Image: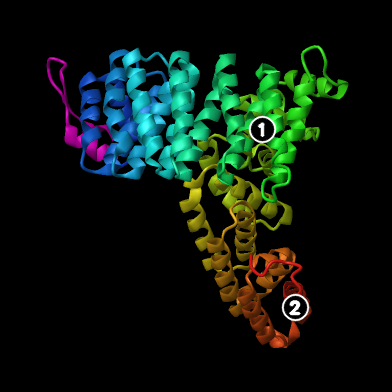
């Protein structure tokens, strides 16, 4: 309430504003009241800035939120904007991650409005670079988005950032740093109006396809795929360079499918030009450009989800509308949105990705098998793009598994299977295997777990021989229990394990995953 912050109006019209009252309002989440006071009275605004240094992280976070709201409504201009930036910049390295994240959110919003001085742009650049270099997952990804926006806004800064980011990818061994740097480059390429900047980035990312780390190569493939939505502005020389690099990856087991998909798009783009393009492609491009955000609902009603997906790649407003539809009260709309998101995952910014994680997690509990499987694939793709989401995934899996509900457990296992497709490692396989054994011991989760193992039977090839014997023993132990309810599935799985063990003895398949 404003009563806490506004103590009294004196006879002369002067207003006494209480710092303690504003602080209490911030802790009580009366942010609209605080914002109204700060907009009207300069003294209240200056007290707000002082509270950026408050010892309580909740106070600091909510002060920044008030500034974000003021900025979004055009109520933070001139000297006030300068002072706000000065105060918030110090908080991007705050010990409390929530405060630092909110500070980055403010800076990213500020970069959208532009209009900073050269000195301010330089300070923002340095602050964002420090966060990216730190390798702190979530913060690095949000800072990367900010660097992308900054480079797109100011061309003379763009080239410095570009060279620094590629150098960082080459020198750092941290995947979180490498991933954030590639995110920054991709965001800049997608937002810049300068064709030279776009091509500079595309060429550098094409070179990353020869990087020794498969993670960097995969991120480069996603980046190139996204940049191809601006294919007309990318030089033929750069496209041909990328094609040559990608052809060397087609035989790679892990990257081959994505490489083939991107290669197909590149080859079509390389042979096409403003003068020569297939009739089908020309019709498709014309169809997409003739629609606006106002046509999205009508297109979905007509079953033209592919057109909306292409529009979302090109228009941030359409993307925003599609993401909002994931929470629509209309179930068919939610499924339309999920279908579209599954096809444009590589086009999600860090902000987009973090925003939709909870609703995608809810889809894992769906009665609809397609919705569960699709949500799991999108979540796994997001994890591959933005490792900072790992805390969310840990929490989500724990929640689903602890519920003991069959559908929740099925969603959790589906997610783990898709994650293992993306980031297969001995540690992940070992963790999944131990969890599977635990779920098989529980009658409430045994049935859904056995069915999931049967669906993913090809993954048994990834287990080492010792684990296969352990699983076989567990299955034999369960055979005949619960009145033989699952004996058919169990017998089939034992046969599969025996076949794998036989092939290993004959040297047909490797002896370990």
Q: Residues within 10 Å of mark 1 (few under 14, many from 20)?
A: many
> How are the residues colored?
rainbow
Compare residues 474 and 396 and report the one nearer the observer: 474
Residue indicated by mark 2: 498
The image shows residue 441, relative to residue 65, as above or below, that is below
Residues drawn in magenta: 1-26
Residue 294 image offset from top left, x and y in percent = 68, 23
* Residue 4 seen from this side: no
Q: Residue furthest left?
A: 11
Residue 343: which quarter of the image?
Answer: top right
User: Horizontal placement of 482 versus 185: left or right?
Assistant: right
Q: Residues within 10 Å of mark 2 (few under 14, many from 20)?
A: some
Taking the spot 24% from the left edge, 43% from the top edge, the residue there is 56
Residue indicated by mark 1: 225
Residue 373: which quarter of the image?
Answer: bottom right
Compare residues 385 and 205 and report the one nearer the observer: 205
**Magenta span contains residue 267:** no
**Magenta span contains residue 13:** yes
Please tell me how many numbered marks the rendered image carries.
2
Taking the spot 52% from the left edge, 57% from the top edge, the residue there is 396
Closest to the camera, between mark 1 and mark 2, is: 2
Compare residues 446 and 460 and report the one nearer the observer: 460
State the SS at label 1: helix
| Label whose residue precedes the other's in the sequence (1 or 2) | 1
Tell me the quadrant of the picture where the N terminus can be found: top left
The image shows residue 500, relative to residue 424, as above or below, that is below
Q: Residue furthest right?
A: 279
Taking the spot 61% from the left edge, 65% from the top edge, the residue there is 409
The image shows residue 449, relative to residue 123, as above or below, that is below
State the SS at label 2: helix
Q: Residue furthest front?
A: 507
């Amino acid at each position: 309430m404003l009563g806490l912050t506004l103590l009294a109006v004196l006879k002369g019209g002067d207003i006494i504003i209480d710092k303690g009252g504003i602080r209490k309002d911030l802790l009580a989440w009366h942010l609209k009241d605080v914002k109204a006071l700060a907009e009207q009275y300069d003294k209240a605004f200056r007290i707000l800035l002082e509270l950026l240094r408050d010892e309580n992280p909740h106070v600091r976070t909510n002060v920044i939120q008030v500034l974000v709201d003021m900025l979004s409504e055009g109520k933070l201009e001139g000297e006030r904007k300068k002072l706000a930036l000065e105060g918030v910049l110090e908080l991007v390295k705050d010990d409390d991650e929530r405060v630092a994240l909110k500070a980055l959110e403010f800076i990213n919003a500020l970069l959208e409005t532009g209009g900073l001085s050269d000195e301010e742009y330089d300070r923002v650049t340095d602050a964002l670079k420090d966060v990216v270099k730190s390798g702190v997952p979530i913060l690095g990804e949000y800072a990367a988005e900010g660097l992308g926006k900054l480079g797109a806004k100011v061309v003379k800064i763009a080239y410095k950032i570009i060279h620094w980011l590629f150098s960082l990818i080459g020198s750092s061994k941290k995947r979180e740093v490498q991933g954030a740097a590639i995110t920054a480059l991709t965001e800049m390429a997608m937002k810049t109006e300068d064709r030279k900047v776009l091509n500079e980035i595309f060429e550098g990312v094409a070179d990353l396809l020869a990087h020794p780390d498969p993670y960097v190569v995969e991120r480069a493939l996603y980046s190139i795929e996204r940049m191809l939505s601006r294919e007309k502005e990318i030089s033929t020389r750069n496209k041909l360079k990328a094609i040559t690099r990608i052809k060397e990856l087609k035989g790679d087991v892990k990257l081959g499918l994505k490489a083939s998909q991107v290669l197909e798009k590149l080859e079509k783009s390389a042979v096409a030009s403003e003068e020569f393009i297939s009739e089908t492609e020309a019709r498709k491009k014309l169809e997409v450009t003739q629609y606006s955000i106002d046509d999205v609902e009508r297109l979905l009603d007509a079953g033209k989800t592919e057109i909306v997906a292409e529009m979302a790649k090109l228009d941030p407003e359409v993307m925003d509308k599609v993401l909002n539809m994931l929470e629509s009260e209309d179930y068919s709309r939610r499924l339309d949105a999920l279908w579209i998101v599954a096809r444009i995952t590589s086009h999600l910014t860090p902000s987009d990705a973090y925003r939709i994680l909870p609703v995608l997690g809810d889809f894992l509990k769906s009665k609809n098998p397609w919705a569960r499987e699709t949500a799991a694939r999108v979540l796994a793709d997001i994890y591959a793009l933005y490792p900072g989401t790992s805390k969310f995934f840990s929490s989500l899996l724990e929640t689903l598994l602890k519920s003991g509900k069959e559908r929740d457990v099925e969603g959790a296992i589906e997610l783990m299977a898709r994650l293992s497709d993306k980031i297969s490692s001995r540690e992940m396989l070992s963790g999944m295997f131990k969890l599977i054994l635990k779920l098989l011991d529980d009658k409430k989760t045994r049935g859904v777990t056995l069915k999931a193992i049967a669906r993913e039977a090809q993954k048994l090839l990834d287990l080492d021989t010792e684990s296969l014997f352990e699983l076989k023993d567990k299955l034999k132990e369960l055979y005949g229990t619960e009145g033989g309810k699952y004996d058919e599935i169990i017998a089939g799985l034992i046969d599969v394990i025996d076949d794998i063990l036989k092939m290993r003895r004959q040297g047909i398949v490797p002896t370990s995953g």
